[in-house]
Image (cartoon, rainbow, N blue to C red):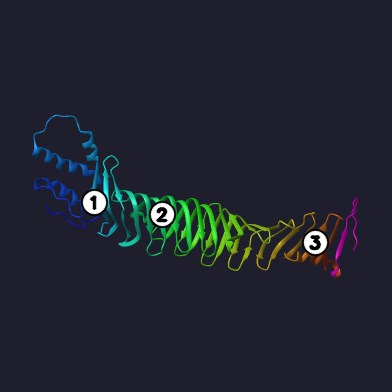
Amino acid sequence: MKHQQGRNNERRTSVMKGGNQTKLPHFYTLPFVFYLQSKVNWRYLPVSLFLVIGLAGCAGKSPTASKPDTASQKSDSNLTFFGVDFEQFDEVGRPIWKVKAKQAKYTKEKQIGQAESPSGELYQDGKVVYQIKAEKADIEQNGKQLFLKGKILATDPVNGIVLQGNELEWRPQEDLLIVRNQLNGTHKQLQAVAQEARVKTRAQIMEFSGKVVANSADPQLQIRTEHLLWQIKENKLIGDRPVQIDHYKNKQITERGSGNAAEVNLKTKIATIKQNARLELLDPPMQIASNSMTWNMSREIVATNSPVRVFHRTENTTVSANQGEMKIPQRTVYLTGNVNALGQRRQSLKSNTLTWYLDNKLLQAQGNVVYRQVDPPLNFTGATAEGNLETENIVVKGGGSGGRVVTEIIPQEGVGSQN
């Protein structure tokens, strides 16, 4: 009997025993060979073998009535083969997976192949997209999907990505590879652990979900979230859930960013944090909060065009403005638009722009300057101001008619003014 090889959308399962194809007596061979060379499914395997076993029993002696042999039934439902190939092809005859195993055990009840040392390739458009191997695995194939359960290792030979997990699912029609259950992914640029990874093989996008912890080599980052997209070609990480980003230098954390969403470009080393964005600095001990901010880790600059609040924890000083920028190495903050600086004793300095030199504790304000303090209560109005808000040592210059400083002294029981 002849059977076409490479038939469209064909799955082949070949069986070898002891390195050679199993040989049976002539009159037993027909049903078994038909099974091996035709389009088949693991679930039909016991039927063919039972036909062979039945013919052998009839040839040897006449049947006798007896109780079923439990040991024989158990043996029939657990069959072991050597040199097994699992193969699947698309509608034009191109492979979409090939998996080999040194040994495979077919379990009738579970209808799966329990394979020893399986290894093979997953194909996209006839090209290898992932190489897979395991010590042991349960293999199940249904023509459209391939399932492996066990300690699985999947390697992307082009990008150098290695995924480890206890379950692998390949859906070639969806261009989708899923690795789950104690997922661990490694790459020269990124390492990640999660509950699951979904790889869109054509789009080159990897989606991590469930307790995601991703570590980047350069810049030195650790990202924690519940859902993270990795655009492999662009080398970008995108989080659309609450995310925390820790930045390290010499294995020591220096800044921590957080927000409800973030995008990190690992090439440019720029992170954009959105929706309740915050950046905590250890040195100087500060917090920057805004609706959206850009964090340039290479240049060590934080900038925002949204309303921003900067809080210095040691000095207990808060400055807010319409937009701002901080140069971390220079330890300098630049604020623009509706600036309001507030000290721990409720002293305040308002202006159009403000430069805050953190090391010198010096504020330089310009444009419509108004300085107020509570004790003693007084106001200053001018064009510019400079000084230390913490010690209330502020010098206001210019302003008013003729460029004079306007000083307002507020007594305890009344209000007076002096020009």
Q: Residue at x 43, y 53 (%)?
A: 197
Q: CA distance from mark 1 to mark 3?
A: 88 Å
| Residue 67 figure quarter | top left
Magenta stretch contains residue 399:
no
The magenta segment: 403-419
Residue at numbered disc 2: 164
| Residue 298 figure quarter | bottom right
Q: Residue at x 33, y 62 (%)?
A: 128
Label disc, if present, on residue 370 of the rendered structure: 3
Q: CA distance from mark 1 to mark 2?
A: 26 Å
Q: Nearer the viewer, residue 107 or 47?
A: 107
Q: In terms of secondary structure, where does tag 2 sit?
A: strand
Q: Position of residue 120 (x, y in %)?
A: 31, 57
Task: Evaluate if marks 2 and 3 touch, with contact meaning CB atoms under 8 Å apart.
Answer: no
Quadrant location of the C terminus in the rendered image? bottom right
Q: Is residue 227 left or right of residue 392?
A: left
- Mark 1, Cα crowd under 10 Å, few <14 / some 14-19 / many 20+, is many
Q: Position of residue 212 (x, y in %)?
A: 50, 52
Magenta highlight: main SS: loop
Magenta stretch contains residue 407:
yes
Q: In terms of secondary structure, where does tag 1 sit?
A: strand
Q: Amino acid at mark 1?
A: Phe
Q: Amino acid at mark 2?
A: Gln
Q: Is residue 207 left or right of residue 275?
A: left
- Number of the front mark, 1 or 3: 1
Residue at numbered disc 1: 82
- Name which of mark 1 and mark 2 comes first in the sequence: 1
Q: Is residue 386 left or right of residue 97?
A: right
- Number of the front mark, 2 or 3: 2
